[in-house]
Image: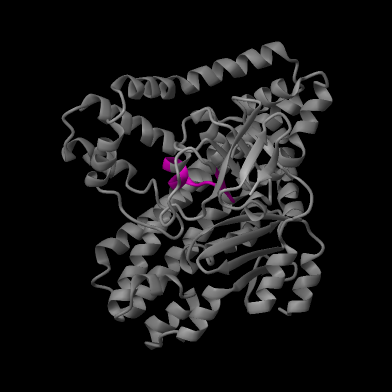
Amino acid sequence: MKFNEIVKEVKKHSWWCEECPGTVQTLYYPLNCFITYSRDLKVRSMSLAIMGYKKGMLIERSPEDGKLEMYKYILKNMKKNPAFLKKIIKDTARNEKIVFYLYKRFSKERKKLNNKELWETYKRWLEKYVSFLSYPLIVECTDIFTTYHLEDAVRKELPDLTPDEMSDLIIAMSSPKELSFMEHERLDFLKACIKNYGKLKKKHFEKQSKKHWFVINSFRNIRYLSPEYFLKEAKKETKKNKKKLEAELKSLKNKIPNLKKRKKEILKKYKLSNNLKLHFKIIEEMGEGIDKRKEKMLQCNYFIDMYCEEIANRFDLKKKEVHEFTVEEIEELLLKNKKPSKTSVKKRYEMSAYVMKRKGNTDDVETKWFYGKKAEKLIELTGPDLTGEIKGYVASAPVDKIRGTAQIIMNTHEEKFKKGNILVTTMTRPDFVPLMRKAKAIITDEGGITCHAAVISRELKIPCIIGTKKAKKLLKDNDIIEMDLKKGVVRRLSK
């Protein structure tokens, strides 16, 4: 795989960008699923994907045309068979069972395994994890359609809609008809807080811990949430008036019934074509798929963390060191007792790019790491255009305009957010929710109408503009900004 050939291929595409804290172990090998999912779906829409890595930040790049081709493939098959996506979900569940079974077996046998057996166990688990991710990954193809094409499809049929009516229709019809895993966690948490208000004890949160132990994990900061953690959070939460907690609980319980009612009202009010209804059905079901994938990936991040812990203990290493090794380096460590060069690990951590490419006309994956200036070049070529205004899609608009102080947050575990600021980031994840509750408004570089930031901001009823592509790069901490929720535009008023 030659660098100049990759550059030439990169220039043929426009690129979808995502960025988050992570480690080499939690994402670089699993992201091979960008190429391998074609084995299962029999469509080769993606021939190239890139993962940049810079000082603990993962920079994901995938071709937008490949994602759109995948969406068209899903649309075509849904027209033939309305249960097409349901079958994919069923297959995903089957693969998920294998992944969780293999980890459960490892957790019981880990101390009995010799190094060779540990390597074979981990390798097999990773391979099954990639297979599991191959199906859930396709749901990302809706980001391209909802960002660039959905509004035009609606406008074509309903040209007289006002911007507010357009936003309301798209949000309501695109929203999943079930609570997210984070909302389920919040529901259970509020019930426990209210039931035991004024007499909170650790035992009241044992079920919470058993069921929701992973909810604030990311791809870099990983932990098992104990009953003590939830008790501590409950003590903070119950400083609020009990009636406020009860009102939030009621709102969560009523969310899905109210949403289903709103969908029926829209279908009764507007004559949507069968084609447009199908688009909304796909986006709705994909939204549910995205949530399920994120939930399972957070749990699998913990599994990876435990594999890294076992490897670290055997070689007198720190767990965080093992997280920065490649799978090939772990193989050499376990089979040949050869530790990776600290120089090569540091070089990869400072600036690198992992390129995944389809081998010719096959379903096999060819991979290569690039470093330093070559890696920077690939990330620059696949990055957003930083000229022009900051404009995105309005995901939540309880007001027409809002002003406030921008604060950029990338790692929720290492950066403190000031209540009342406008949260600016590349994309939000479950660990962002406590910060989002404190935010005056939210701006993200990434995401379609069903993304995490869109869903949570609507639930919290705070202003949100998603998919700006460049807000995080162009805005600075303490900038005074204005969000125009009519036009989806962000303006910097002063520095």
Q: Residue furthest front?
A: 494
Along the line of sight, the residue nearer the viewer: 241 or 341: 241
Q: Is residue 170 above or below residue 41?
A: above
Q: Residue at x 22, y 46 (%)?
A: 228
Pinpoint residue 176: horizontal percent, then vertical percent.
Answer: 55, 31
Along the line of sight, the residue nearer the viewer: 131 or 316: 316
- Residue 299 visible to an observer of this rendering: yes
Q: Residue at x 29, y 40 (%)?
A: 233
Q: Which residues are magenta?
A: 423-434
Q: Is residue 96 left or right of residue 446?
A: left
Pinpoint residue 155: horizontal percent, then vertical percent.
Answer: 80, 26
Q: Residue at x 74, y 27 (%)?
A: 276
Q: Is residue 434 above or below residue 248?
A: below
Would residue 274 be counted in the magenta stretch?
no
- Which image quadrant for residue 230? top left
Q: Is residue 150 left or right of residue 226?
A: right
- Which image quadrant for residue 362? bottom right
Task: Identify the colour scheme used.
Answer: one colour
Q: Is residue 429 left or right of residue 311?
A: right
Pinpoint residue 82: horizontal percent, then vertical percent.
Answer: 65, 32
Q: Is residue 365 above or below residue 76?
A: below
Q: Is residue 136 above or below residue 103?
A: above
Would residue 430 be counted in the magenta stretch?
yes
Along the line of sight, the residue nearer the viewer: 481 or 383: 481
Pinpoint residue 17: horizontal percent, then vertical percent.
Answer: 66, 55
- Where the N terminus falls, by quadrant? bottom right
- Residue 89 visible to an observer of this rendering: no
Q: Count of labels shown?
A: 0
Along the line of sight, the residue nearer the viewer: 488 or 296: 488
- Which image quadrant for residue 115? bottom left
